């Protein structure tokens, strides 16, 4: 079977980079945001038995992401298996990595391969000017009366740093070897690795199903 999987040329550690808690105090985390989705126009049904591969040399990170995706896929009616432990996979050689995946498909029944990889990381620093915040304060005078006044507080100007991580999720058909669905998504300043993996898996599987039912 020919499987010309279009894997990223520059493979980088995925999850510990993507989902590290790199936020300054006061910066709120943002759940996954879908940037774009594309689907092969001649494909109406999604593969239902998937091999899931997170592209990262960090074994613990791969395990976490693959487990989150497999769990979500199974709960939504798919059959799915993680690629699993693979410390010797040639992460820096996309052609060799493709061959390893093809070899794996010779011994595992799957009609699709779902991959996720880091595309880029955007670091932003935003200047926030000083702000005056008004807070109502009520003081009681005896049992029946009260006085309300506005208390002011000045928040000095400061800089807020945020990091946006762009992920690419691709579904390949194993028979044709072609990419039949792809999603780009972003996550800003995730608070924890586990939470980010679960939220990403939820969004990815939701959008995958929606693309093949609309």
Image (cartoon, rainbow, N blue to C red):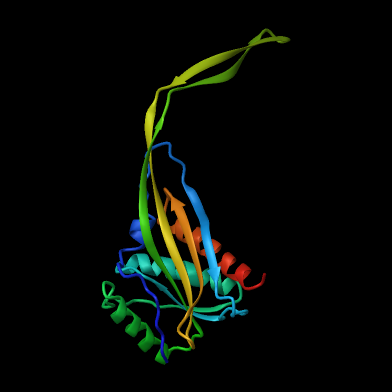
Locate residue 9, reporting x and y percent: 31, 70
Q: Which of 6 and 32 is in front in this view?
A: 6
In this figure, what is the number of numbered marks?
0
Locate residue 26, reporting x and y percent: 43, 36
Q: On screen, 119 above or below 190?
A: below
Residue drawn at x 67%, y 69% is 214
Residue drawn at x 44%, y 65% is 168
Q: Which of 213 and 31 is in front in this view?
A: 213
In the image, 188: left or right of 95? right
Q: On screen, 3 above or below 180?
A: below
Q: Which of 54 and 178 is in front in this view?
A: 178
Residue drawn at x 40%, y 79% is 5
In the image, 87: left or right of 122? left
Quadrant for the N terminus in the image: bottom left
Q: On screen, 167 above or below 73?
A: above
Locate residue 116, reporting x and y percent: 42, 68
Q: Looking at this view, name the residue that lies furthest to the right.
A: 144
Q: On screen, 135 above or below 149?
A: below
Locate residue 47, reporting x and y percent: 56, 81
Please tell me in which quadrant of the rendered image residue 177 appears: bottom left
Residue drawn at x 54%, y 15% is 151
Q: Looking at this view, name the residue that lies furthest to the front.
A: 41
């Amino acid at each position: 079977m020919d499987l010309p999987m279009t894997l990223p040329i520059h493979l980088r550690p995925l999850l510990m980079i993507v989902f590290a808690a790199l936020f300054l105090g006061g910066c709120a985390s943002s759940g996954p945001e879908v940037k774009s989705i594309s689907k092969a126009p001649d494909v109406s049904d999604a593969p239902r038995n998937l091999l899931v591969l997170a592209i990262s040399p960090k074994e613990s990170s791969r395990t976490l992401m693959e487990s989150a995706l497999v769990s979500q896929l199974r709960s939504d009616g798919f059959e799915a298996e993680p690629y699993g432990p693979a410390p010797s996979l040639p992460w820096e050689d996309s052609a060799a990595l493709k061959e390893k995946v093809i070899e794996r498909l010779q011994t595992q029944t799957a009609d699709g391969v779902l991959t996720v990889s880091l595309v880029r990381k955007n670091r932003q620093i935003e200047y926030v000017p000083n702000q005056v915040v008004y807070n109502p304060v009520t003081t009681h005078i005896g049992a029946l009366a009260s006085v309300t006044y506005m208390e002011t507080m000045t928040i000095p100007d400061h800089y807020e740093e945020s990091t946006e991580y762009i992920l690419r999720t691709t579904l390949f058909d194993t028979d044709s070897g072609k990419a039949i669905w792809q999603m780009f998504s972003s996550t800003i300043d995730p608070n924890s690795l586990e939470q980010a993996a679960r939220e990403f898996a939820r969004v990815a599987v939701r959008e995958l199903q929606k693309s093949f039912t609309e």
